[in-house]
Amino acid sequence: MVSRATSPVLLDRLQASWYLVRFLFDPLGTVKQAHKAFGPFIIATAPSRWPIRRQNPNPRPTFVCGIGADFNREVMSDPITWRTVPLGPGGPRHSAARQVSVGIFNFRGDKHKHYRQLLTPPLSRKSINAQGAQFCHIAAAEVERWPINEPIDLWAYSRALIQKLVIKVLFGDDPERGVPIAKLVDHFYDHVFSWRNFLCPFNLPGTPYSRMLREGELLKGYLLDWIKTKRGFPDSDDLFSIVANSHDETGATPDDVEIIAQVPPLMVAAFETCQNALIWTLVLLCQHPRIACDLLDELQGRLAGAAPSVELIGDLPLLDAVINESLRILPPVPQQFRVASRDTLLGDVPVPRRTKVLLSPFLTNRDPDLYPEPDCFKPERWAGIDPSPYEFFVFSGGPRMCPGSLFGVSVVKVLVAAILIRFRVALASNALIDYKVTLTLTPNGKIPAILYCQDGDFSGSPIRGRIHNLVRFQN
Ligand code: HEM
């Protein structure tokens, strides 16, 4: 166990209520403010017992916010004590919405190990190298279709691009069936993570909860249809086919519902993260024209007219640094939650069973000792640092660390290269760039932009919106 010099600050009931409610509306801003006010180790006890019933035997729930590498390591290296929490409120016990969101994130013990082992090979370096030509080809062909010289929503194009690419490469190259499902998964999880869903988990017309239940039904139907093309057709590159054609951890053959349940969480793990990494990298490059210009020089120098390939862009220092810096400052998964399965200690502080811990990649990645001027986008800093996974807390750490990190980074690198070689991307002047936090840190609304044929004439234009709360733009 790691000892931390810091002792916790205990919030009183009033402070706890204020921060817990604010957190629902502005998680990153609230955690940032709490960290500034109280330091890296905060304990808040909910003002009342949940559920609120007479003679409720439950103690009041305890929440801990722990910021920093030591915290991350302590919690993430002990997945038996610190369990993952379900993705969103789910739905009634036997609802389709609940059935289609029980994937690897919720598995524990042998089941978790078993499915992790199944899913790791197609995401490995070997597999990326083997599939590299295919996904570079898809990337180039898709980017080629993007319109020039007209206003577009760059976010919509980036999402569609990632969805198509991931469906083709990781879900058996079946875009006719896969892309509509991917879109539905996107909507479904938007409702799952809506704060309104947490406040009003009732099936009333017009609520995100009722939409979540409806879309859960739809999704289940589509997936049950799709599984017919997967059962009996094993494909070692297709995550759905791998799960559909394997035994479970006990050696038994899982039924269709157990199998399809795993697909939406896998899709969301792959799309949501890569989509956000791609769009934020493009936004950051638009607002840092000198870096975009240097990056184009690096790419043109290496590619010399060839299309981007995994080998050609494998070790480009500035491209690597740009992607790392983008993931650092706007991490696709900006916060992680765990719950204590037993009474335990954090450092030497006792915390009861069911304590919920919030870890913050967003703030860990802004530790000024490791990342001076943490709110600035400075890819050059990566020439001199080599942080551990707990210090650069983007892919989590320990036994549940993201198995798709290499794949995700390769996808984003190839796409940034393909886009930059072909286009000069300019955000619309005075564009409103806002964000929201669901499972991921994601644009809230459109990203209005225009693509010009690449002429190297980079210049940033002023933008508005809450993105300025997260990044201090310099150029
Ligand atoms: C830039 C891209 C990516 C980022 C930033 C990212 C980030 C993360 C993070 C932070 C976690 C831990 C979540 C938690 O335990 O609470 C995670 C887990 C996971 N990721 Fe990724 N991810 C990325 C790409 C991918 C891709 C492309 C896949 C492919 C399917 C993937 C599959 C998974 C899976 C299956 C898990 C669960 C691992 C487990 O519980 O053992 N990720 N990812």
Image (cartoon, rainbow, N blue to C red):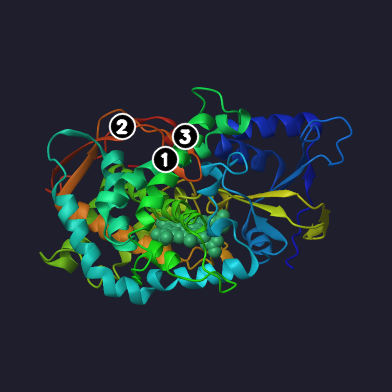
Quadrant where the N terminus sits is: bottom right
Quadrant where the C terminus sits is: top left
- Give the left or right position of residue 331, taking residue 352 as reference: left
Circles 1 and 3, Cβ within 8 Å, touching? The answer is: yes
Amino acid found under the numbered disc labelled 3: Arg
Q: CA distance from mark 1 to mark 2?
A: 42 Å
Q: Nearer the viewer, residue 196 or 388?
A: 196
Q: Residue 188, located in which quarter of the rendered image?
A: top left
Q: Residue furthest right?
A: 55
Q: Which residue has dot 2 on it?
A: 462
Q: Secondary structure at mark 3?
A: helix
Which of marks 3 and 2 precedes in the sequence? 3
Examine the rendered structure and indicate whether residue 303 appears above or below residue 217: below
Amino acid found under the numbered disc labelled 1: Leu
Position of residue 444 measured from the top left corner of the image (x, y, whole percent) = 41, 33
Position of residue 170 measured from the top left corner of the image (x, y, whole percent) = 34, 62
Q: CA distance from mark 1 to mark 3?
A: 6 Å
Which of marks 2 and 1 precedes in the sequence? 1
Residue at point 70%, 29% (across, down): 18
Report crowding for label 3: few under 14, some 14 to 19, many 20 or more residues within 10 A (C-alpha).
some
Amino acid found under the numbered disc labelled 2: Pro
Circles 1 and 2, Cβ within 8 Å, touching? The answer is: no
Q: Which residue has dot 3 on it?
A: 214
Examine the rendered structure and indicate whether residue 158 appears above or below residue 197: below
Circles 2 and 3, Cβ within 8 Å, touching? The answer is: no
Q: CA distance from mark 2 to mark 3?
A: 41 Å
- In front: label 2 or label 3: 3
Q: Which residue has dot 1 on it?
A: 218
Q: Nearer the viewer, residue 126 or 246?
A: 246
